[in-house]
Image: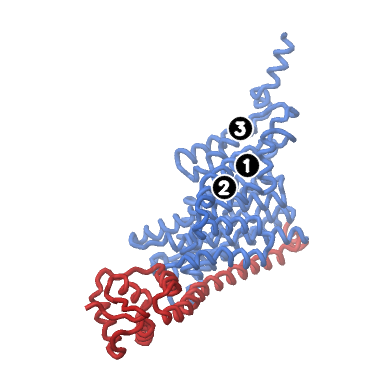
Chain colours: A blue, B red
Amino acid sequence: MYDLLISFLTNTGYYFISQDFRYIIMILVGCLFLYLGIAKKYEPLLLVPIAFGIIVGNIPFFKGFGIGVYENNSVFHYLYFGVTTGVYPSIVFLGLGAMTDFSSLLAQPKLMLLGAAAQMGVFFTLLGALFLGFLPREAASIAIIGGADGPTSIFLTAKLAPHLIGPIAIAAYSYMALIPVIQPPIMRALTSRKERLIRMEDLRDVSRTEKLVFPILGVLLCCLLAPTALPLLGMLFLGNLLKECGVVDRLANTARNAIIDTATVFLGFAVGMSTQADVFLTPQSLKIFGLGALAFSLATASGVIFGKIMNLFLKKKINPLLGAAGVSAVPGSAREVHLMGQHEDPDNYLLMHAMACNSSGVIGSAIAAGVLWSFNIMG
Amino acid sequence: MGLENIALNHGWSQAFLGALIVMTGLVILSFAISQIHKLVAFWERRQAGPSSAAGEGPANQEADSASVEGAQCPLDFTTTLKIYRPLTESLGAPFQLKDLYQRAVEYDLPHPHITIRCLREDGHLVALGEGFFNWNE
């Protein structure tokens, strides 16, 4: 009986956790994320499932029981399957398309260029990751953090460097949650008060026909250019067509509510669980976090600087703060731009214009992911 | 590690080409969507032309409802009537809506199609049958 008791005790989580303190660190990280999500309300829809996944994923167990996310045929392994195959990100994009109103973008198409400019951060970071010695596929997966789009980052990493999904997803979502901390200093440093005070012209009304044509035109133009972006952009534009066509409201409602919510819960939880301490806490992860911060900052800066460059050629100047919303963190970065604009001038309403940049950022980051995937398939 | 690793893995070309492709893609999309409303307006104008010539018919109603999107009838028609009534003086009474529409276009009046529709719906233009109308005195 004593032997049985000892054998049981040495198979408990308490025993394993006493053998490897890294699990405690990760559980504390999970608790910190829970605090940020619940108390500080930093992207709670994402952070709460991820944080709880981190806690669950870091309860150590006897390997071979078929419990963990990395063990074949375990329940969690099947949940994680949706991450590694890129199924969840595609489904999230369907819901995102059904939620997004592209009117502001259709009213001011030139703002789309800011969404493109913000993707430059991705390619600068690609160079940085290669400089630090990462393999090309790993570097591409790290670089896409600059797109500030969690599902896109997970999708590309699942295709190119599945062993890095945990740190990359956590980095991407952490930086998205930390937008109110990261972006404002960069925006302030790169713009003058006069520039921040620039008011944008009112948006024109957009007809239903335009909204209807956009997803069809969008999928054709973007996916013919980068077919590897199809799993993301195909679903995004499908969701948007469901929303705008007006004859399948039931499907659109399901896509923007039940479907995206289900996918978000599983995606967040599975990604959180993939941060098992023995796999996650490595020097490589630290480098990824550093590069992720660099990617995010460079993307923000690229957008703002491009906004200033555009002003050199435009008669009607645009507010360069909008460039910061070119990263696709919807709607966090648009909100930050709007708040900063209002901080300088309470009557300056930039939200709808910033949403236009945000929407184009979503499209831009998906194209960037497709392009990086193509390069690495061909390479 | 270092610049050698970038060069070895075609990092420079990947970064340059990647940025160029993303920018090109979005510039093309941006240009295309900037043209949508012009094409839609052109299409609606094309539809509006023959349909107004046909007078009151199902096709006319369809064209009317298409052009109405995004615009609203004025609450007070006084000003509208002051502008539109003189247009029909040279046409005589009764007149056809296509002629009124053409006059309005000639004078560059905004939203002539929807304005005429609103005038009809509000009872200021009375149908006399066979595609002819007159002002409601």
- Left/right placement of residue A132 relative to residue A344 reads right
User: Relative to B66, is A264 above or below?
Assistant: above
Q: Which residue does the numbered mark 1 point to in the structure image? A: A271
Chain letter of disc 1?
A
Looking at the image, tell me whether mark 3 or mark 1 is earlier in sequence order: 3
Q: Considering the numbered disc 1 on the image, is that residue within a helix, a strand or a loop?
A: helix
Disc 2/disc 3 C-alpha distance (Å): 18 Å
User: Relative to A327, is A287 above or below?
Assistant: above
Residue B6 location in percent, x, y? Answer: 73, 61
Indicate the quadrant where residue A294 lies: bottom right
Residue A66 location in percent, x, y? Answer: 72, 30
Of the pair A125 and B22, the residue shown nearer to us:
B22
Chain letter of disc 3?
A
Disc 3/disc 1 C-alpha distance (Å): 11 Å
Residue type at tag 1: Val
Looking at the image, tell me whether mark 2 or mark 1 is earlier in sequence order: 2
- Left/right placement of residue B91 relative to residue A35 reads left
- Report whether residue A290 is seen: no
Quadrant where the C terminus of chain B lies? bottom left
Q: Which residue does the numbered mark 2 point to in the structure image? A: A173
At 62% from the left and 42% from the top, the residue drawn is: A271
Indicate the quadrant where residue B78 lies: bottom left
